[in-house]
C-alpha cells in the first residue's frame, strides 16, 4: 500500500475518532473502508477482520469500535514503509 493511501486512511480514522458515535457513512468513503479491511487482513489482525465479516453490522460500526487500534496499525505500516 502506498504512503499517500496510508496517510489518507489515517486522516479518515482521525476524523472518525473525533466524531466517533456521531460519524455518518458517506458512500464516497467506501473505497477507504475497503482499504482498511484489506490492511487488517494483510496484517493478520484477525479480531478486527472477523468483526468486519459479521453480517448485519455495517463496517463503520467496526471502524468506530476499533478506531484507535486501526490508527496504530496504519501508523505502524507507515513506519515500516519508511524503514524500507
Image: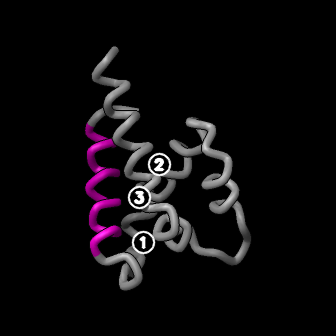
Q: Residue under circle 1?
A: 27
**Which of the two discs, 1 and 3, sits closer to the camera?**
3
Q: Residue under circle 2?
A: 35
Separation of marks 1 and 3 at Cα, in angstroms: 22 Å
The crowd level at tag 2 (other Cα within 10 Å; few <14, some 14-19, many 20+) is some
Q: Residue furthest right?
A: 55
The crowd level at tag 1 (other Cα within 10 Å; few <14, some 14-19, many 20+) is few
Q: Quadrant of residue 80?
A: top left
Residue 54 is covered by the magenta coloring: no
Point out residue 36 in the picture as x, y percentages from the top left corner: 48, 51
Magenta span dominant secondary structure: helix
Per the rendering, the mark at residue 68 is 3
Left or right of 65: which side holds 77? left
Separation of marks 2 and 1 at Cα, in angstroms: 14 Å
The crowd level at tag 3 (other Cα within 10 Å; few <14, some 14-19, many 20+) is some
Mark 2 lies on a secondary structure that is: helix
Residue located at (32% from left, 29% from top):
79
Residue located at (66% from left, 62% from top):
51
Mark 1 lies on a secondary structure that is: helix
First along the sequence among labels 2 and 1: 1
Mark 3 lies on a secondary structure that is: helix
| Extent of the magenta region | 4-18
Q: Quadrant of residue 43?
A: top right
Left or right of 23: which side holds 66? right
Q: Residue furthest top?
A: 84
User: Is 12 or 48 nearer to us in this picture?
Assistant: 48
Point out residue 29 in the picture as x, y percentages from the top left corner: 39, 64
Point out residue 66 in the picture as x, y percentages from the top left corner: 50, 62
Residue located at (58% from left, 36% from top):
42
Tell me if residue 20 comes above or below residue 44 in the rendering.
below
Residue located at (27% from left, 72% from top):
18
Amino acid at each position: 500500500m502506498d504512503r499517500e493511501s496510508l496517510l489518507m486512511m489515517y486522516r479518515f480514522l482521525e476524523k472518525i475518532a473525533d466524531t466517533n458515535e456521531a460519524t455518518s457513512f458517506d458512500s464516497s468513503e467506501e473505497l477507504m473502508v475497503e482499504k482498511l479491511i484489506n490492511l487488517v487482513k494483510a496484517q493478520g489482525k484477525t479480531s478486527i477482520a472477523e468483526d468486519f465479516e459479521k453480517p448485519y453490522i455495517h463496517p463503520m460500526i467496526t471502524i468506530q469500535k476499533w478506531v484507535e487500534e486501526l490508527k496504530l496499525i496504519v501508523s505502524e505500516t507507515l513506519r515500516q514503509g519508511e524503514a524500507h
